[in-house]
Amino acid sequence: MFHYKIPMTPGPVKVSPAAFPALIADFGAGYMEDEFYDTYRKVGQKLQNFMGTSNEVVIQSGEAMSILWGALKSCVLPGDKVLCISTGFFGSGFADMARSLKADVNLLEFGFDETIHDYDRIESIVKNFSPKVITVVHCETPSGTLNPIKELGKIKQKYHVPVMIVDAVSSIACTPVDGDEWNADIVMGGSQKGLSLPPTIGFCSISDQAWDIIRKTTYEGYEAFLPWYRLIETKNHPNTPDWNGIAAMDAVLDELAAEGIEEVFSRHLRVAAHIRKTVCELGYKLFPKEEAVQSPSVSAVYVPGGSTFFEFNQRIRSHGMGIGGSFGPLEGKIFRIGHMGSQATMKNAEAALDVLAKVI
Ligand SMILES: *Cc1c(COP(=O)(O)O)cnc(C)c1O
């Protein structure tokens, strides 16, 4: 069976062994069982700790993309003003998604090697455009960067923007995510990144203000948020939940809590710093600009001169190591090392760095 000995793909991440028993346990049909809703409630509470929020958490089947679509479709009606602040592929992707919903989209794009800055400009756009929704990405995975969100949240609050949607898919459980401090209404995550689970679940926290909008928007569809409103009380699950996946998430969240949330974050920082320092010493060049904030969960590096990503990746793979390429304008130019979740260990980092030393 195919597998990577040195897993460094920036998602899906190597599944944590803590998840194994729950993934193969025999559960019933979750929508019928009280035990399922007990687990669902517990997992929601544990996720709140990693999302810095006391808002209700919704856990859906699908994966992170389904939550991204669910958030937009559940909040945005044709003609609604949506401000998409982008420093990369996922940030700009929100603009395409919102346009497909016939929203009135304003895309504020920074360089893909930059992180959010120039708050005066952002403030004047928010003031003049007065969006209903702001979208932003915390960790821009294809660029290896981590956007600061707090200042943006202050602007959102000052101009009473109803909904701020934050994609924290590749930062949750890797680095602090402070949903309430950021004034974020919807903070989104997926199972296959920092939580080291298979790609079967998307989840998000939802503020009361966002619930009001969702209840007015009345979007119905597979990824709609509306059926999840007060789900623990209604037990009106619209489909068969991934009980195994949610129970596995419970086990992983317990494992991370036992390690200690602060230690989980410092482990990511240590591994990220070691990888970046060493790849630079080996002669590689990091993609983000010097003044950009680098992500603790993923590093984006230029493919060495003279080889294509395809050739480079073939050589890396021949050593049993998995890496990621990049997307959009960065496709072919950048490779990525995913040091998130179960992959963020010094042992894995050393093995990966040995391979990177051999192939340059
Ligand atoms: C991985 C990721 C997603 C979701 O992509 P999937 O197709 O679910 O893997 C969304 N946003 C960001 C920032 C991501 O890193």
Image (cartoon, helix red, strand yellow):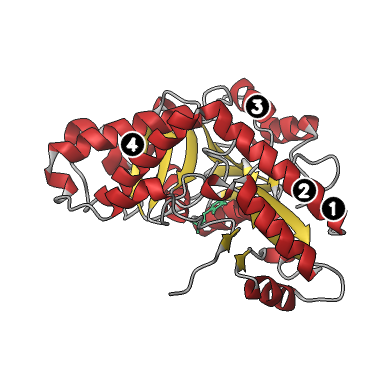
Tag 2 near tag 3, CB within 8 Å: no
Q: Is residue 291 visible?
A: yes
Q: CA distance from mark 3 to mark 1?
A: 30 Å
Residue at horizontal 47 percent and vertical 25 percent from the top: 53
- Calculate the distance from the C-alpha at mark 2 to the C-alpha at mark 3: 26 Å
Residue 313 in percent (x, y) is at 68, 72
Ligand 1 within 8 Å of disc 4? The answer is no
Q: Nearer the viewer, mark 2 or mark 3?
A: 2
Looking at the image, is 95 positioned above or below residue 217?
A: below
| CA distance for labels 4 and 1 | 50 Å
Task: Name the residue carrying label 4.
Answer: 215
Tell me, for residue 280, which label it has, or none. 1
Residue 170 x/y as whole percent: 56, 46
Looking at mark 2, is its residue's CB closer than 8 Å to ligand 1? Answer: no
Q: Which residue is mark 3?
A: 150
Task: Identify the image quadrant of the N terminus.
Answer: bottom left
First of labels 4, 1 by sequence position: 4
The Cα atoms of the two marked residues, 4 and 3, are separated by 27 Å
In the rendered image, which quarter is residue 199 located in? bottom left
Three-letter code for the amino acid on which mark 1 is drawn: Cys
Q: Judging from the image, what secondary structure is the residue with disc 1 in?
A: helix
| Observer-nearest of 274 and 312 | 274
Asked which secondary structure carries label 4, the reply is helix
Residue under label 2, please give it: 276
